[in-house]
Image (cartoon, rainbow, N blue to C red):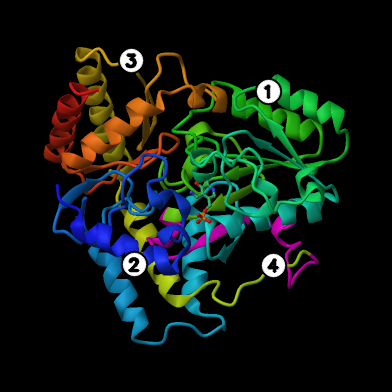
Amino acid sequence: MIYKRSSALFSEAEKVIPGGVNSPVRAFKGVGGTPIFVKEAKGAYLYDEDGNRLIDYINSWGPMILGHAHKPVVDAVIEKAQKGTSFGMPTEIETKIAELAVSMVPNIDKIRFVNSGTEACMSAVRLARGFTGKDKVIKFAGCYHGHSDSFLIQAGSGASTFGTPNSPGVTQGTAKDTLLANYNDIDNVQTLIKANKNEIACIIIEPVAGNMGCIPPKEGFLESLREVCDANDILLIFDEVMTGFRLSKGGAQELYRIKADIVCFGKVIGGGLPVGAFASRNEIMNHLAPLGPVYQAGTLSGNPLAMAAGLAMLNELNNDSGIFMRLEDKTAYLHNGISSVLKANKIVHTINRVGSMISVHFDEGAVTNFDTAAKGNNDTFKKFFHGLLNEGVYIAPSAFETWFITDALTYQDLDFTIEAIDKVAKTL
Ligand code: PMP
């Protein structure tokens, strides 16, 4: 494939944007080479500036669960845009999407919309601190909750790709309130709680981790977390920015039948526009300004275009009783296909999957936490990534990311992808 125009555009971008990108993983630093500039996308395909067509397994890192430029979402945005793009005043559509979200997700009475997953998680933790009157937070190594200061401690996703899981600029004062635990290790959590008695406001977790590849919770792990939170007056925050409206209508809470105290959303809930949200029961949400003392705000929060895209997306998911099963079936088909061609080519690997989140790790042991995810062979991953790109298949340019399957993918696309992986595996 030719990437002449993408390369030229990247050189221009580098002059005026740090690293040529507005979010680090896009720069291909983890895999080498020049990032691809996308011109447009439709359904399961990206079309780049050089005229190449790529099957997309990133899908804007999750939001495009029904494929790119999905008509009901696009139509809703166009219709709204003609009536004004921002008012900073209440609009009816905010209540409509809030009502729908509250009806789809278990255990929530109220939801507040923000502009990104980062804002959602940052605000959720502030609310947990304000509600409990305690300061400390437990997070898990390799989980990513956005780029706000408290979370850039052993963070996954781009932070891991760039080897800077602890970012300069985060003060010692902030870092000392974030305690780190190993994913899937309840004993480790118990030890931290004992050592910080009555100081922990909340535990925040990706109920299925998606930022160190895809890592499912071990059986009983989320249940145990719920129990230790209850026993110690700690709020349990599920960061469902990836899993929300993807693993089921009600996200991971519904899938695993675990009640979280606060839930964070992003990605799918905005239909591809900049949206995040956090939600909880009345008792907790009523602590937020203007009802309560915990401050949180946003000039563009509840923006009409973003709400229109999000509402159209949630309506599509809510009204399609087969969607989550179709996604599951397609992803399982891909999982089996990849597994058999990698085995046939004697490539050491582990595949993790929950619903329509899947990741391929080039190591043979079980991948259950950040340490085991980091053991994967990155040289093999780089070759795998570039080989697939050459075949017209676009996966995330980092071994620490999850693939997001979209319903727009056909079984033909999946077969094409499995054949491409077979070809690439022969070169690894
Ligand atoms: N939480 C999780 C689980 C995420 O995956 C992400 C982003 N990938 C975020 C929070 C932050 O969201 P955003 O990039 O929209 O700020």
Kindly report which numbered mark, 3 or 2, lies closer to the viewer in this rendering. 2
Q: Position of residue 3 (x, y in %)?
A: 20, 53
Q: Which residue is mark 2?
A: 12
Along the polypeptide, which appears first: circle 3 or circle 2?
2
- The residue sitting at 14% across, 33% down in the picture is 415
Q: CA distance from mark 4 to mark 3?
A: 48 Å
Q: Is residue 291 left or right of residue 338?
A: right
Q: CA distance from mark 3 to mark 2?
A: 40 Å
Q: CA distance from mark 2 to mark 1?
A: 49 Å
Q: Position of residue 423 (x, y in %)?
A: 15, 27
Asked if the stretch drawn in magenta spans residue 284, the answer is yes
Along the polypeptide, which appears first: circle 4 or circle 3?
4
Along the polypeptide, which appears first: circle 2 or circle 1?
2
Q: Which residue is mark 4?
A: 296
> Assess mark 2: CB under 8 A from ligand 1?
no
Q: Position of residue 356 (x, y in %)?
A: 35, 38
- The residue sitting at 60% across, 59% down in the picture is 119
Q: Amino acid at mark 2?
A: Glu
Residue 186 — which label?
1
- The residue sitting at 56% across, 24% down in the picture is 371
Label 3 residue SS:
loop
Label 2 residue SS:
helix
Range drawn in magenta:
268-293
Along the polypeptide, which appears first: circle 2 or circle 4?
2
